[in-house]
Image: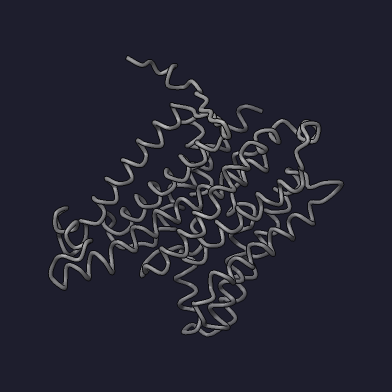
Amino acid sequence: MTSFRQLSETRTFRTSWFSHRINLKVMMLIALAIAILILLMLWAITLGAVDLSIREVWNATWGDGDRKTLLVVRTLRWPRIATAVVIGMALAISGMLFQSIARNPLVSPDIIGINSGATVVAVAWLVIVRNTSQLPLAAFLGAILTAAIIYLLSWRNGASPDRMILVGIGVASMTQAVTALILVRFPLEQIRPAVVWTMGSIYGSTWRDVVITSLVVLVSLPFAILLMQPLRAMSLGDNVTRSLGIPLEMTRLGVILIGCALAAVSVAFAGPIGFVALMVPHMARMIAGPQSGGVLVFSGILGGIILLLSDTLALHFLPVVLPVGVVTGAIGAPYFLFLLYRSNSRM
């Protein structure tokens, strides 16, 4: 029988033109997470006012069934479930990237202001322009602009991770105040969609949402995996990173760009969902080990599981139906305090 230590070994696969190391333990964890995610999706899609069996869901997925079942499965339930999974993956990957660049497990795009920057521009767009078709672009521009402000304000012969965190917290407070100002400035009937959206919800998700968010994740993931190796070197300090010939600031800019794209697409289609980007990367490292490309993928799948589980809980197992952002906030806030306690106890 293969021991756990043997599963933790790294195997190298070589061809005449390619060489890559694979951690067998991480690969098995990824396979297990995928299996759990599939089972969770199948279970979630059977829940609701219309009781459906797995067989009915399977048939309706491929277009076989009565009109009511097809509507429930293909138009209402599958898009919401798929959106929850993809956005959970985007948030988790974004969180691991920002935690890696800041060298701090208490950092995430919602803590240092990236989500808040995307939110303030998206809210202004919803309230003033009232055009949801361009909302993803508005959220992305808000995230990039906020990241640029944080990067420039923290620059002093380079962008120090500690200064980026402090500046990001300040920028987050400022953008949250601007969002609140917008919401109290306009009439209630005009801001109602934005108020619901700011709670973080995937209600009313469509296949268009699934396609766009999936494309962003699929395009960003390979670049994020490639950046994990230089990020591991950057964890040793800026001087060591430069001595290894790694372009420090270019790597940071690449990480910020990819992290902002993933955070922005999540905000655009689900609103500001808190704490997923903070919790999941930390949980992934506790289970799978130090950051790597495989652990990044595992973190993404784990993020999909956590967000889908939270949405299922919010939709079916509480006295009232709540936005998923309320549930992740209720779970994430105590977890954040736990991480803060652990970090203080080590100092």
Tell me: 148 left or right of 341.
Answer: right
- Residue in the picture at 65% in, 49% down: 255
Q: Is residue 230 above or below residue 214?
A: above
- Residue in the picture at 53% in, 43% down: 336
Q: Position of residue 343 (x, y in %)?
A: 60, 33
- Residue in the picture at 42% in, 67% down: 209
Q: Position of residue 268 (x, y in %)?
A: 51, 66
Q: Residue furthest right?
A: 157
The image quadrant where one finds the N terminus is top left
Q: Is residue 289 above or below residue 334?
A: above
The image quadrant where one finds the C terminus is top right
- Tell me the quarter of the picture where residue 26 sits: top left
- Total number of numbered discs in the rendering: 0
- Residue in the picture at 65% in, 70% down: 178
- Tell me the quarter of the picture where residue 302 sits: top left
In the image shown, does 30 or 270 lie closer to the viewer?
30
Tell me: 149 left or right of 23.
Answer: right
In the image shown, does 250 or 134 lie closer to the viewer?
250
For the rendered model, the colour scheme is: one colour
Q: Position of residue 194 (x, y in %)?
A: 49, 74
Q: Residue furthest front?
A: 16
Q: Position of residue 298 (x, y in %)?
A: 45, 39
- Tell me the quarter of the picture where residue 287 sits: top left
Q: Is residue 33 above or below residue 165?
A: above
In the image shown, does 321 or 5 lie closer to the viewer?
5
